[in-house]
């Protein structure tokens, strides 16, 4: 079974921990009192339906990274051996649109990740308004898949999008492993 390390990054107070808990089936509560993540939380779980009915699925290490820039010195250690990055933001907060460009530059461009290894999630916090508007993203961010997340109204849509995203990550991981094995053989 392949193991994928995926980082969940983005500005403070955008809902990364709520999303991480939901995706890992770590909690039933959506919402609650805000408590910022200090550094990183690592959630491990299996995702059996990544390959449909073909193969054993994959193990996921979901790294819920704190959004405070005081942890920036830790970013290289977090990125080491990562296979994918999910950038989460709240499109209701104008500063988040600027801030996700910093996250994109540090976690995606510098790591030279492929587009299928990256995902943008515009997360709607519980109790917020409607998120029908498409946020204005930079040309680099606009290349990435954008998913709107509303855990109160359509949680399973987010789960399906996450599985689809994981398929791309696993595909890249398998291709990389195959290339590595071929280079050893030849």
Image (cartoon, rainbow, N blue to C red):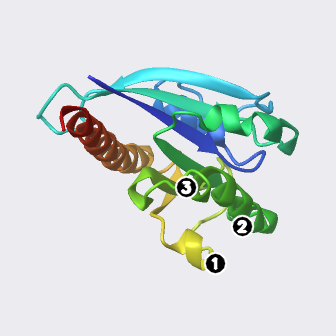
Secondary structure, mark 1, is loop
Q: Are marks 1 and 2 in contact (CB under 8 Å)?
A: yes
On screen, residue 36 versus residue 79, left or right, reads: right
Q: Please rate how many residues cluster around mark 2, counting C-alpha atoms within 10 Å: few if below 14, some from 14 to 19, many from 20.
A: many
Q: CA distance from mark 1 to mark 2?
A: 8 Å
Residue in the picture at 48% in, 65% down: 144
**Which residue sits furthest right?**
70
Residue in the picture at 72% in, 31% down: 32
On screen, residue 53 versus residue 169, left or right, reads: left
Residue 147 in the image: x percent, y percent? 48, 59
Residue that mark 1 sits on = 136
From where the camera sits, is residue 30 visible? no
Residue 179 in the image: x percent, y percent? 26, 43
Residue in the picture at 52% in, 55% down: 112
Instruction: Tell me which corner region of the image, top left, top right, bottom left or bottom right, holds residue 155.
Output: top left
First in residue order: circle 1 vs circle 3: 3
**Vertical comparison of 24 with 65: above or below:** above
**Vertical comparison of 56 with 117: above or below:** above
Secondary structure, mark 3, is strand
Identify the disc placed on residue 97.
Answer: 2
First in residue order: circle 3 vs circle 2: 2
């Amino acid at each position: 079974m392949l193991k994928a390390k995926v980082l969940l990054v983005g500005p403070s107070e955008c809902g990364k921990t709520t999303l991480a808990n939901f995706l890992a089936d770590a909690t039933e509560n959506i919402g609650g009192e805000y408590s910022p993540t200090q550094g990183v939380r690592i959630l491990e779980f299996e995702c059996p339906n990544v390959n449909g009915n073909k193969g054993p699925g994959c193990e996921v290490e979901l790294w819920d990274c704190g959004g405070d820039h005081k942890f920036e010195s830790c970013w290289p250690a977090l990125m080491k051996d990562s296979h994918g990055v999910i950038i989460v933001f709240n499109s209701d907060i104008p500063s988040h649109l600027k801030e996700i460009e910093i996250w994109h530059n540090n976690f995606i461009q510098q790591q030279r990740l492929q587009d299928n290894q990256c995902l943008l999630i515009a997360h709607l916090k519980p109790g917020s308004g409607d998120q029908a508007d498409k946020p204005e993203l930079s040309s680099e961010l606009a290349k990435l898949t954008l998913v709107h997340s509303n855990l109160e109204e359509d949680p399973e849509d987010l789960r399906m999008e996450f599985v689809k995203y994981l398929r791309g990550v696993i595909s890249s991981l398998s291709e990389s492993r195959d290339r590595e094995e071929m280079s050893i053989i030849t």
